[in-house]
Structure formats: structure tokens, C-alpha cells
Image (tube, rainbow, N blue to C red):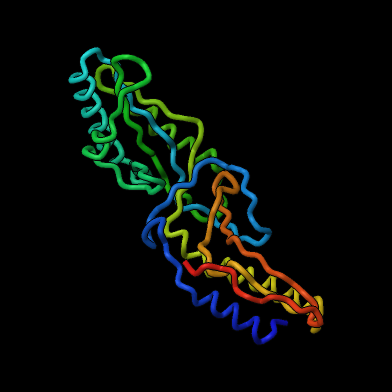
């Protein structure tokens, strides 16, 4: 099991302050498509809170004034349509954070398109991911069906992308659970080796990280490590971590 001075090191790490520089504790954070991450072996998996479909609203009228006016009328219609669908929400994504969509915020994001005389803006159509058995394609179909029901004003088109994203509210809440699972692994390892071994944990003060691990799920982990050594071996047990 842990030796007393190792317990002290772990205790200091657990008490180290953690800065949530990415945002407040209750921010909704978007996680895009599945990507390869060399995450540690210990992690927890949780279901996301929302499924989001990317939607582009674009207009190619010759005059910019007309393009902007038609885009404004179109987004007003989209907002009204969403009000009739209690399981549909409209959002914008800013620096990875999901924010409620408003007409003003949408208009502020209008950009020139790739083709001449085009303007566009993107939004997210989202629905909550229910508990229990659920098939992702059915949720995507619901979002697609809503988008297909929308009409663009004038030369405005409303299109979707195949990729969908998952968002989660307050992902930092899972840090303690991840940390406890890591400590359980360390404890079990030392107990299995016997009383003649000790362990030095590192990285337990770090932030929790997350990555998409499936259609609806997220994997949460920490960049931890630990060193195991026999008691008859002299080892430098200095703490290398920076308490940020």
C-alpha cells in the first residue's frame, strides 16, 4: 500500500488549486468528431448532454443589402419554427462554448462566402440526449427533419453537414471521479506487488480532459503517471509538478 510520505505527496496534489481557464463551471462545451488521442489507460466514459447538427444559412443575391435582409428574415423564421419544437434548440458556438442563438448574434457572424456575391452564417441545431437506450441516428434524423422543414427567404439556402457534435455541461465535474479511479489503480497495483514496493504519483493536480469516444459518449481522463520502485532502492521523490 502507499507509504506515509507517498500519501503526503498525493494529499498535496489533491489539495492543489485547479484553474478552469477554459470557462466557468457550468459552461456547455462542444466536442467535435471522434479523433485519436493518446489518453492514459484509466478513464471514465459519460454520455453527452446534447447532440448538435451544423447548419449553414447562405444567400447569393447580387446586392449585399438584399442578401443581409433575406438572411435576417430567414433566421427570424428559423427562430419562430424552433419555438414550436420543444425538443429542438438553436445555438451558436464561440471558442468551443455553446451559446443560445439570437437573431442579433447570428447577424453578427455573417461572413462573405467562397463564391462572389455570397454571404453566410452558421448555427447549431441541437436536441438533448436522453437517458437509457437511444440510437444516435434517430436523434440525427430528428434534427435533419427540422432543418428540412425550414424555408429560406429569397435566394437563401439552408444546408446541413453530415458530421454531428456532442456537447456537455460542466465537464469539470468529472475530475474528482477520474482522480479517484486513478488512485484506485495505483493502490491496487502497489497492493498486488506487496509491502516491499512503493509508488510515487504524479499529475493528480492537473485538469480533467475529454474526447469524443462514440456517437453519443465522451471519455474523461487526466494526464497522470506514477513510478513504482522497491523499498531497497534509493529514489528521488521530489515533486516535479507545477501547481497551476
Residue 17: give x, y in percent of width and height: 45, 72
Q: Residue at x 42, y 32 (%)?
A: 145
Nearer to me, 38 or 51: 38
State which quadrant residue 55 falls in.
top left
Q: Residue at x 54, y 40 (%)?
A: 33
Q: State the residue lying farthest toward the top.
A: 62
Residue 225: give x, y in percent of width and height: 66, 65
Residue 34: give x, y in percent of width and height: 58, 42
Can you say whether 167 is above or below 80 in the image? below
Residue 54: give x, y in percent of width and height: 42, 35
Q: Residue at x 73, y 76 (%)?
A: 235
Nearer to me, 64 or 169: 64
Nearer to me, 231 or 167: 231
Can you say whether 50 is above or below 196 in the image? above
120 horizontally vs 231: left or right: left
Q: Residue at x 28, y 15 (%)?
A: 117
Answer whether residue 155 is visible to the viewer in this image.
yes
Amino acid at each position: 500500500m502507499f507509504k506515509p510520505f507517498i500519501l503526503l505527496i498525493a494529499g498535496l496534489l489533491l489539495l492543489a488549486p485547479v484553474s478552469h481557464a477554459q470557462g466557468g463551471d457550468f459552461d456547455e462545451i462542444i466536442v467535435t468528431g471522434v479523433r485519436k488521442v493518446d489518453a492514459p489507460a484509466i478513464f471514465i466514459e459519460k454520455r453527452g448532454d446534447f447532440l448538435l447538427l451544423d447548419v449553414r444559412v447562405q444567400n447569393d443575391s447580387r446586392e449585399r443589402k438584399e442578401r443581409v435582409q433575406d438572411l435576417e428574415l430567414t433566421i427570424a423564421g428559423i427562430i419562430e419554427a424552433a419555438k414550436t419544437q420543444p425538443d429542438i434548440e438553436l445555438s451558436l458556438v464561440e471558442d468551443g462554448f455553446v451559446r443560445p442563438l439570437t437573431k442579433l448574434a447570428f447577424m453578427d457572424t455573417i461572413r462573405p462566402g467562397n463564391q462572389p456575391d455570397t454571404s453566410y452564417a452558421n448555427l447549431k441545431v441541437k436536441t438533448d440526449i436522453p437517458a437509457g437506450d437511444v440510437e444516435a441516428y434517430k436523434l440525427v434524423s430528428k434534427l435533419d427533419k427540422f432543418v428540412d422543414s425550414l424555408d429560406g427567404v429569397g435566394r437563401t439556402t439552408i444546408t446541413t453537414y453530415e458530421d454531428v457534435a456532442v456537447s456537455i455541461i460542466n465537464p469539470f465535474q468529472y475530475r474528482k471521479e477520474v482522480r479517484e479511479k486513478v488512485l484506485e489503480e495505483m493502490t491496487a497495483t502497489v497492493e498486488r506487488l506487496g509491502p516491499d514496493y512503493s509508488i510515487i504519483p504524479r499529475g493528480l493536480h492537473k485538469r480533467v480532459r475529454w474526447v469524443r469516444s462514440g456517437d453519443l459518449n465522451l471519455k474523461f481522463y487526466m494526464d497522470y503517471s506514477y513510478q513504482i520502485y522497491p523499498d531497497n532502492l534509493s529514489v528521488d521523490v521530489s515533486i516535479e509538478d507545477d501547481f497551476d
